[in-house]
Structures are given as structure tokens and as C-alpha cells.
Amino acid sequence: MTWIATVAYADAKGRLKTLYDRIKAPGGIIDNIMMAHSLRPHSLEGHMYLYKYVLHHSGNHLPKWFLEALGVYVSHLNGCEYCFEHHFAGMARLMDHDPRSDEIRTALTADRPEDAFEGEELVAMHYAKALTRDPAAVQEDHLVAMRSAGFDDGQILEINQVVSYFAYANRTVLGLGVSTDGDILGLSPGDSSDSENWNHG
């Protein structure tokens, strides 16, 4: 599942067990990306806060499916099959498996977001690609383009944070050899609890 040692749910104790209980899927399954943090529970907790607050917080204004689509594209650009498959499944679920989800998958894997997006959504995809491929080359003009397309600055921040989160998540996965073996694709960790209630305890 990973190239480093991990602690299984059945063997977890103390703080790790508490955290696992918050994020486990049915049957006590822990996503491998989260289990990869198990030797440092504080790292797992930090990852979960970042994930929940960036992608699933009720304070976001952009649709969850579109934030997931941005993550799917970034994961493709970074060559992270794990995050691509997990978040594509999550995006499709949020779209009620609308046939458009398959169109989006085809477009993003071909690196042709224009085949599935237009208007402000396509401008956001272009920003995601620029920030992923060459972050030092991003200029204020990229944000001006998003404003001109219709995004306000809070929405631009949401887009920026999703793209940035996936840079972190992709490198966690790729750098530790995390696989999807045993995972349930598309099931958000801790789906049974709202992100705002994911409190320290």
C-alpha cells in the first residue's frame, strides 16, 4: 500500500485510533493516503483538516463537483493516478453520475479541458494548469482573467487552495508509493461527519 510502514486500523491505539475512527469508511477501511501518515498522527490530522476545509467546507461558494474536477486535472498533470481515480469517482458521485462526468474525464486525460469546459470554468482550468506546471511563471494577469470571466476574489482563493492542496496530496502519494489497493474509490474520508464538526478532541 505504501513504501513505508503503516499502522492498520485494527492495531491503532490512542490518538491514532481516535483519528481513524473519524475518517474510517464502512468496515473500518482507512484510505491509504491517510494511513500513510499513521506513524505521525499529527500529520494525518493536519492533512485531514486541509482536505476537509479546502474541498468540503460549507463556506465555499463554488460547487463541490467543480472543485473536485480541478483536483482531477491537477492530479493528471502531476501523474498521480491515485488522486485522479479517487477524486474522479468523487466528482462523478457529486454529479450523480451525469454522462458529462465521463466527458470531463476524457477531456482532462487528453489535456484538453476546452472539450468539456467553457467560460469561467475553462479559465479556472487554465489557471490550474499554469500553477501546477510552472508556478513561478504565474502572474497577476492570470487572476485578472479569472475576474474578467466572472469569479470574485473569494472564489479565486478557493480555486488557488484546491490546486495547491492537490500539489501537496499528489506529492504525498507519489513520494511514498501509495496505492489504491483496498481503498473505496470516491468515498470522502469521514463522509458521515460534516467538516465543520471535525474538531480536535
Image: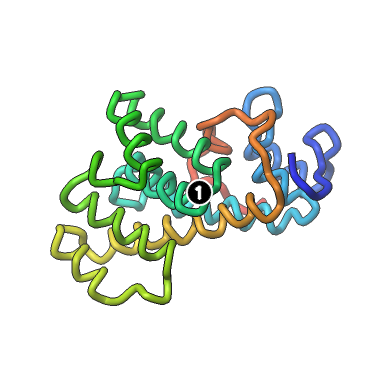
Q: Is residue 39 above or below residue 66?
A: below
Quarter of the image with the N terminus is top right
In the image, 141: left or right of 161? left
Residue tagged 1:
52
Q: Dot 1: what SS?
A: helix
Q: Nearer the viewer, residue 51 or 130?
A: 130
Q: Residues within 10 Å of mark 1 (few under 14, many from 20)?
A: some
Q: Where does residue 118 sit, x and y in percent of width and height?
A: 18, 46
Q: Quadrant of residue 156?
A: bottom left
Q: Is residue 13 left or right of residue 165?
A: right
* Picture coordinates of residue 153, whole percent (x, y): 25, 66
Is 107 on the left-hand or right-hand side of 164? Answer: left
- Identify whether 76 is placed above or below 95: below
Kind of residue at badge 1: Lys
Can you give x and y, in whole percent of width and height, for residue 44 in the image?
A: 67, 52
Residue occupying the point 59% across, 50% down: 48
| Left or right of 170 on screen, residue 7 | right
Q: Seen from this angle, which residue lies furthest front?
A: 110
Q: Residue at x 67, y 51 (%)?
A: 201
Residue depicted at x 42% and y 76%: 136
Which residue is located at x 40 percent, y 35 percent? 91
| 158 up-or-down from 182: above or below | below
Number of labels in the image equals 1
